[in-house]
Amino acid sequence: MARIVIALGGNALQANPKDISAEAQLVTAHETSKAIVDLIEEGHEVIVAHGNGPQVGQIVSTYEASASLNEKNPVMPFPECGAMSQGYIGYHLQQAIREEMKKRGLNKEIATVITQVVVDEKDEGFKNPTKPVGSFFTEEQAKKLMQEKGYVMKEDANRGWRRVVPSPLPVAVVEEKIINTLVDAGHVVITVGGGGIPVIDRGNGKLQGVAAVIDKDFASEKIAEILNADKLIILTAVEKVSINYGKENQQDLSKMTISEAEKYIEEGHFASGSMLPKVKAAMMFVNSKEGRESIITSLEKAREAIEGSNGTRIIK
């Protein structure tokens, strides 16, 4: 049996992108839990990571809308919004996975660890913020926010102006010892939600939250290394990684070596906003230690992918 870190994609939390309600997310979480508990039932040690793009954006937008109606209502700082999203997504996954385990007679405990992830303030990502978050604004409103709050605002596909934040790489996980202890004790752990809350280590025990978004695939890779996992499974909307995606000559890949992945990246086969970070994170994990493997597949095919009959396996 293996120690597996599962990185859940957005479709594992919101089946219908047009319905971003908490109620709909809980329903989807219950469906998602079945595939996760399949692996737990087979005896694997499972650690769950997840994204939070729509959820943290919704939280930010709610506070922004409140502040626009009454200037006495404060806008919540971005790191706190990330913590809120970790908490409520973790709550839904805990509830769903626990219920599914109980149905199957699995006597395991599950917990969400609100996770801080250290980033380097000199990371290149801080020089060029690219991740849009929150509401749309007019150009006039955007300029006011830039002046008053120091936000970086950019026009988003002619739909209006939005705040953009950096996307630095993860350096360390603050709660790694706690997470290790829980996993070693046989518990199911949900961690690095949304990539973790980005913090800068100021020394002497002081951590400072920063307005940034860590890619959940890179954060999942980092925690997989820390926990000495055997496998990193990155779940997305498709069963396999493809080259020439969406074209007549599309080719689905059952396996991909590191050198092949590098070649495909150079040729531009993977989009930066979707498959590229998944492939890069998978490569990083495989390269981190001999014997580790990464799999990219859909939630529904996770069990088959581990058995070797589906998904894309990234190997040396």
Image (cartoon, grey):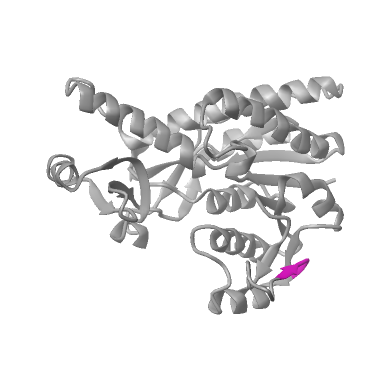
Residue 169 quadrant: bottom left
Name the residue: 58% across, 72% down: 269
Query: Which image quadrant for residue 28?
Result: top right
Above/below status of 161 relative to 269 = above
Quadrant into which the N terminus falls: top right
Residue 316 visible within the image: no
Q: Position of residue 119 (x, y in %)?
A: 41, 50
Q: Nearer the viewer, residue 50 or 109?
A: 50
Residue 136 locus on image (x, y percent): 30, 42
Query: Magenta span: helix, strand or loop, mainly?
Result: strand
Q: Is residue 309 left or right of residue 116?
A: right
Q: Which residues are magenta?
A: 251-255
Answer whether residue 125 is magenta in the image: no
Residue 289 percent across, percent down from the top left:
68, 62
247 relative position to 2: left or right: left
Left or right of residue 92: residue 162:
left
191 relative position to 209: left or right:
right
Task: Name the residue: 75% across, 31% down.
Answer: 186
